[in-house]
Image (cartoon, rainbow, N blue to C red):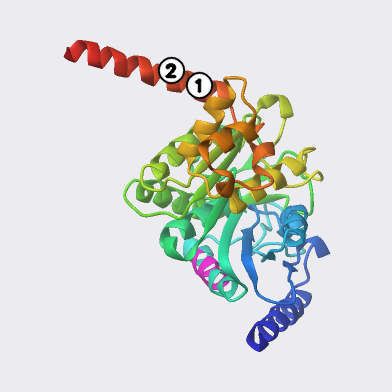
């Protein structure tokens, strides 16, 4: 307990002192911590998005802290600094992927001292880093939350820029205290990690991941999310996937209302459902399939004897699961199996 209290004090004071000397763009760019008086069962480590800051995870940090978790949201290297940034004076984002990887490992080690089960997550480029940690330190991570991870370079990304001057790009819509733009070399550093992740997932152990996408997201390729999830599921049954319907109009910057998401409460619900449940994706699909037969969640779970595997937030999570898509896939598999059996006969 003494070590925990000392570490908590050191983290808060040292990081605060260092960031006070850095001259940050806004106080919302400061690293954000929410600690309890003792180590918790779950500790959550989040990495914010590219050019943004820890403010993106404040709403979720508050919800998870209220639910009993310790939460750490450190400021990524090269981010959040005040300055007159532009094409002739680009922000000092790192262009070496190793800087991000070293940073992630350092904070994972700190998180391990703050609770029993480490939950790692991130948005966009932060989710790309969290994905790498999920494979690099699979045994050390209890759950991984991947909010719209950046996995691949796409022409859709260019749609978000109004200016593209040589190697410098500016954001079309600047929401929150983010850098106004970046050099492409800095984005390539994230892309290198993403490419490595995609190659490795087919053959490497991985911690359980929850892949969260949005059909309204123009910045990343949701097909890549689906492919990565399916590859991870091959050797990690506790992976989940959810894609928010286009009707909700949830953007890439999905973590806060300030950046365009009016349904941040949904993120909190599905996050709590995942980290507090113990269902494999096959079991989630089984519940969803049976609910298409006009069954309630509670009756299905009771019949299956899985009450101990679900949490208080799982029923709300199941309202977002595309049950009919799961049912159609199930029926198609049944038909294919029936045809094969007839052919064999």
Residue 193, above or below 228: below
Looking at the image, residue 197 lies above or below residue 83: above
**10 Å crowding of disc 2: few (<14), some (14-19), many (20+):** few
From what the image shows, is residue 36 above or below residue 222? below
Label annotation for residue 331? 2
Q: Secondary structure at mark 1?
A: helix
Depth check: give the residue in front, 58 or 237.
Answer: 237
Farthest residue to the bottom: give it. Answer: 2
Residue 210, how many percent across, how many down?
A: 55, 46
Please state which of residues 200 and 325 is positioned toward the viewer in this rendering.
325
> What x and y, as percent, mark residue 177?
79, 54
Q: Indicate the quadrant containing the N terminus: top left, top right, bottom left or bottom right.
A: bottom right
Q: Is residue 152 above or below residue 135?
A: above
Q: Residue at x 45, y 52 (%)?
A: 192
Q: CA distance from mark 1 to mark 2?
A: 6 Å
Question: Which residue in the rendered view is the most extreme toward the left?
Answer: 345
**Dominant SS type (magenta):** helix
In the picture of the structure, the residue carrying the numbered disc 1 is 327
Q: Is residue 254 visible?
A: no
Q: Position of residue 283 (x, y in %)?
A: 49, 38
Stretch of the chain drawn in magenta:
101-107
């Amino acid at each position: 307990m003494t070590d925990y209290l000392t570490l908590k004090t050191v983290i808060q004071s040292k990081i605060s002192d260092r960031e006070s000397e850095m001259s940050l763009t806004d106080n919302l760019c400061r690293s954000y911590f929410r600690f309890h008086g003792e180590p918790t069962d779950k500790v959550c480590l989040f990495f914010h998005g590219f050019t943004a800051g820890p403010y993106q995870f404040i709403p979720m940090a508050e919800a998870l802290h209220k639910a009993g978790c310790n939460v750490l949201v450190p400021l990524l290297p090269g981010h959040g600094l005040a300055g007159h940034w532009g094409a002739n004076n680009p922000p000092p984002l790192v262009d070496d992927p190793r800087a991000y990887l070293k940073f992630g490992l350092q904070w994972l080690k700190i998180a391990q001292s703050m609770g029993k089960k480490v939950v790692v997550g991130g948005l966009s480029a932060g989710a790309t880093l969290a994905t790498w940690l999920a494979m690099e330190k699979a045994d050390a991570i209890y759950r991984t939350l991947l909010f719209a991870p950046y996995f691949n370079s796409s022409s859709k990304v260019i749609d978000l820029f109004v200016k593209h001057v040589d190697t410098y790009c500016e954001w079309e819509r600047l929401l929150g205290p983010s850098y106004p733009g970046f050099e492409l070399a800095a984005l390539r550093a994230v892309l290198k990690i993403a490419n490595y992740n995609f190659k490795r997932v087919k053959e490497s152990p991985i911690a359980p991941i929850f892949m969260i996408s949005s059909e309204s997201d123009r910045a990343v390729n949701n097909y890549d999310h689906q492919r990565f999830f399916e590859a991870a599921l091959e050797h990690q049954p506790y992976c989940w996937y959810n894609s928010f319907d286009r009707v909700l109009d949830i953007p890439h910057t999905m973590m806060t209302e300030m950046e365009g998401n009016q349904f941040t409460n949904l993120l909190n619900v599905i996050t709590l459902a995942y980290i507090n449940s113990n269902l494999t994706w096959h079991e989630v699909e089984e519940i969803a399939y049976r609910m298409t037969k006009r069954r309630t969640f509670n009756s299905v779970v009771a019949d299956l004897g899985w009450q101990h595997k679900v949490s208080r937030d799982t029923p709300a999570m199941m309202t977002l699961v595309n049950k009919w898509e799961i049912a159609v896939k199930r029926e198609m598999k049944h038909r294919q199996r029936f045809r094969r059996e007839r052919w064999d006969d």
